[in-house]
Amino acid sequence: MRRSLLVLFSCFLLSFGCYADKVVIEEIRLWSDPEKTRFVFDLSGPPDYRAFSVSNPYRYVVDIKNSDFEKNLKLPALKESPVSKIRKAKKDNNTNVRIVFDLNTRVTPKSFVLTPFNQHGNRLVVDLYKFQRKGEEKIKVAVKEPSNNFRDAIIAIDAGHGGEDPGAIGPRNELEKNVVLSIAKKLAKLVNDEPGFRSKLIRKGDYYVGLRKRIKIARENKADILLSLHADAFKTANVRGASVFAISDRGSTSEEAKWLAENQNQTDLIGGMGEYVKIDTKSEPLVRNVLLDLAFGYSQRESLELGAQVLKELKTVTKLHKEKVEQAGFMVLKAPEVPSILVEVGFISNPKEAHNLSDAGYQIKIARSIFGGVKNYIYDRPPDGSYVAWLKEGPRDLRVHVIERGDTLSELSLRYSVSLEALKKYNSVRGDTIKIGQKLMIPAS
């Protein structure tokens, strides 16, 4: 009898221990970017799981062993996603859970686990990529050339963080990712409104882009410069002011620069890009060549000059944290042949700056000052074949006419003694429509 009671008690303890060690699904969140839809499971511990696809109809199934749902677990709103419905249930005598994604289209799924890092605990990530058949290439969007036969200066604008990675968090829950995206969009508008300039936003919404992919996007779009915007936090709340950083291959120029670079370089861990991989210059010839080029090469010199121009303009609208361009080993600045700077628009950990950075009017001032520095740099060093280079060279065989109210192509043709056909062809104008403020290149008659 005594032995039986001991066995029963042991079984009770064993079952209680198993229950106590259950991995609890605390929350399920959703992020979307142009390539995929991401579901993030916040868990109380590391999961033992399997995931598999089912067809007819298309489904993606996730089974997690020895697990349970948080009481009143809410499922995310699906918005625009390939998932029509999410179903959850307990199975195997309530010891395991199953989550089924009912799909309205075929996808290419990928799942992986992220270990605790900073403010994040254990996470299971499910990525549902747009399905691509074998042999089917992704459609590349051609870089649009301006209509005046001269190319634009292309400014790549990278709003830091995004999606799963909120970046720094201010005293009133201000999120760095939201602040810098708002400034980036305002800056992009200023760039696009300026003749001879065009912007490329690295991210346009609340989703995460891997650090190396940010570089890749800038290069694929033939960017002339790359601006990475941040509003970071520091260990103490009294630190404030804007800063500008360029790449360094010889250590950091200050302890703060080193600390910021180390934090920024680890954002892939938060954003859900897998474990952070240190650069192995022996196995990655592209990165090796970049670092060699940056040692005393073009990119580093130009980045410092660009940074100095931006810092000079920022000084007119906000307090500076440092009076000169600092240097550190920021991963996002290691773009070959693209002058790149990281702009800290302020410290969101400082209550006053966090308040300012959340204000739309202040954001516009910051955006204008950054673009002011960019314009000064581009006009000092205009890209070959660009509209700005043409303006600076002052060609003798071409003139520019800015369209005013009442102007017509036929009247301009007569005024400048140029055939209507030549005028339209030279400016890639179809039809007879022109807009007030539009610039027309007038070729020699």
Image (cartoon, rainbow, N blue to C red):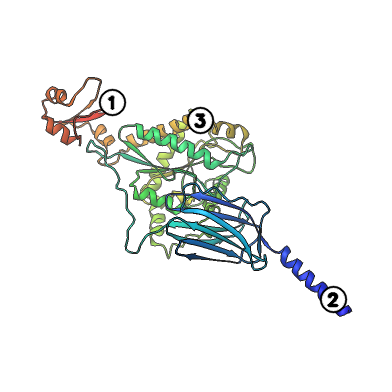
> Residue 349 location in percent, x, y?
61, 39
Q: Nearer the viewer, residue 48 or 387?
A: 48
**Which residue appears at 58% of the width and 47% of the height?**
255
Closer to the observer: label 2 or label 1? 2
Tell whether 410 sits left or right of 239: left
Visible residue check, residue 285? yes
Query: What x and y, as percent, mark residue 282?
Result: 43, 65
Q: Is residue 404 left or right of residue 259?
A: left
Label 3 environment density (alpha carbons within 10 Å; few <14, some 14–19, many ≥20): some
- Label 1's element? loop
3D distance between C-alphas at marks 2 and 1: 91 Å
Q: Which is more toward the observer, 281 or 134?
A: 134
Residue underneath mark 2? 6
Numbered mark located on residue 437 in the image: 1
Q: Is residue 136 above or below residue 302?
A: below
Amino acid on which disc 3 is placed: Ala
Of all residues, the one furthest to the right in this rendering is 2
What percent of the width, then of the height, locates residue 22?
68, 63
Element type where label 3 sits in the image? helix
Sequence-wise, which precedes: disc 2 or disc 3?
Answer: 2
Sequence-wise, which precedes: disc 2 or disc 1?
2
Q: Residue at x 52, y 54 (%)?
A: 85
